[in-house]
Amino acid sequence: MDLVSAAFADAKGGTLIREVVRPDGTRERAWTPPNGRVALELLARMYPEDWRPVKAVEVSGHQGGAVEIGPNAAVIEGIVKRIAEVRKRRQAQNSPQGQLPSGPIAD
């Protein structure tokens, strides 16, 4: 088993790690639980532009006051555009010969 397959197996969980057969014929089995840390680390290394760890930043408003929070159409449009770009990039990576599929991107 290669390293990537082992990491995926650990992230997914469900690997048999212990099996005991008692003298009365009963069996006891222990399975690994899913390991979210391994999954996140693997994603961060494979796709750092989308999954890299980000440090928290404290933000304050004008002169150290509160930050006004409300719907901002420009911010929402920017997020939608970034999501569409990532989706298009992933489709290009997964399509044969790196070609973009024809037609609109499905939601």
Image (cartoon, helix red, strand yellow):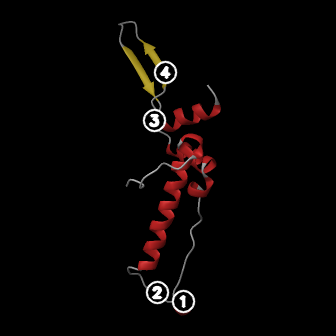
Amino acid type at circle 2 is Ala
Residue under the point 40% across and 19% down: 28
Dot 4 amino acid type: Arg
Residue matched to label 2: 66
Where residue 62 appears, as percent x and y from the top left, is 53, 91
Q: How many angstroms separate mark 3 from mark 4 (CA)?
A: 13 Å
Q: Is residue 60 above or below residue 84?
A: below
Report the residue marked by disc 4: 18
Q: CA distance from mark 1 to mark 4?
A: 57 Å
Q: CA distance from mark 2 to mark 1?
A: 7 Å
Q: Which residue is mark 1?
A: 64
Where is mark 3, residue-wise? Answer: 33
Real-space CA distance between mark 2 and mark 4, rounded to the nearest whole angstrom = 55 Å
Kind of residue at badge 3: Pro
Which kind of residue does numbered mark 1 sit on?
Gly
For disc 4, the neighbor class at 10 Å (few under 14, some 14 to 19, many from 20) is few
Closest to the observer, 60 or 4: 4
* Mark 3 element type: loop
- 39 over 24 or under it: above or below: below
Q: Residue at x 52, y 57 (%)?
A: 86
Image side of residue 14 versus residue 10, left or right:
left
